[in-house]
Image (tube, rainbow, N blue to C red):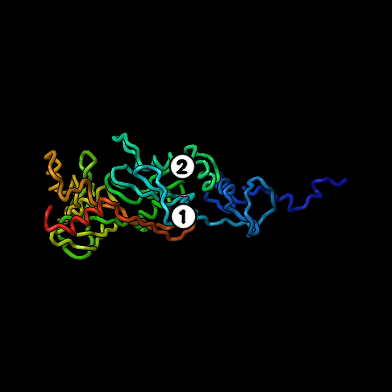
Amino acid sequence: MTHYAEMKDDSIQNEKTLLDWAVQLCPDSPRKRIKEWIAAGRFCLDGRVVTKAGMRLADPGDSLTMGKPEKSAVAWGHRKRIHPKLVLIYLDSDLAIVDKEAGLLSVPTENQSKISALEVLSNYLNDARGEATRRSFFGTADPVKTLPVHRLDQYTSGLLCIALNDNARQHLIKQLRSHNFLREYIAYGDGDAATPEGTWHNYLKLDERGYDQKLFVEPEEGATEAVTHYRVEEVFAQNHVARLRIRLETGLKHQIRIQAAAHDMPLIGDRIYHPSTQKAVARKGAQLPYGFKRQALHATTIGIIHPTSGKKVKFQSKIPGDMQLLEERLKSSKGEV
């Protein structure tokens, strides 16, 4: 007597679900995430998109491939305002790039009850209105994580990168630590630069409160190395002010602000590290230097290696209106502060 099992074709015996084969193709990714990728149409079989994780098939070999999506929630050059102080400029299944206005926290803090950019994005992606976005970019209606990669001070404006899954965050943090994560800023320094371009190399240590930084010229116990590169873009000689393009190599709290001050170029409007601004703030009702109410610092450029595609991508932001007005004031003034 011949048993039915003996008559089965070997290919049928070797059948598995599409999800099983996809897991083998992406061994470093969680099974749940791969299932979401399948539903989002990121896998192809013989060049055709397949979206049913449970479909059974024999070993597909090289005919099963995974695409390299870099979808954007809004097309390049378009911006979507998701909060009065936050604009979404890029979104895919791994990360988001947002443009933050001064005054909005970048991440939640223990001492602040105000909403942060991280929470604004989470609310936007995870409320009922965001379901279509989640299905389009993540292949699921399940909640999406928003994970911090780096930070901006509350009153620094500009670009912020937010990871949307643990793997992407690990990739991006690794780029930060290996100095492959480009972060450029525009700043207005109140003073004369020693050279047209150069590097500030110091050591920083948080004070006892953990809020302000202390700067050291030589290595100090408990202090961390801080390296910042700068280039003078324009000099407003009548005011002894320079517009600086700054590139971070390391990224410590208040790094640009305290290093600029230590090199005789405190940022206009800096209430902690600019002596004249400190004095004006202490005298309630006194006019702030140049009438500028926050540190003149804007994160203008982010450049990363995309965690999924491996491609280099760059995002840019123009300086905001208050800094444009500051520059106009500097160009038109005759040494008035």
Is residue 310 placed above or below 91 in the rendered structure?
A: below
For image coordinates 66% across by 56% down, the residue present is 60
Residue type at the position of mark 1: Ala
Q: Nearer the viewer, residue 147 or 120?
A: 120
Pointer 1: what residue?
75
Q: Secondary structure at mark 1?
A: loop
Give the Cα distance between marks 1 and 2.
17 Å
For image coordinates 34% across by 47% down, the residue present is 100
Estimate the x, y position of residue 192 in percent, counting from the top left. Answer: 15, 60
Q: Secondary structure at mark 2?
A: helix
- Asked whether, in this view, residue 256 is left or right of residue 34, the answer is left
Q: Nearer the viewer, residue 289 or 254?
A: 289
Quadrant of res 209: top left
Is residue 195 placed above or below 109 in the rendered structure?
A: below
Pointer 2: what residue?
125
Residue type at the position of mark 2: Leu
**Quadrant location of the N terminus?**
top right
Q: Nearer the viewer, residue 134 or 176?
A: 134
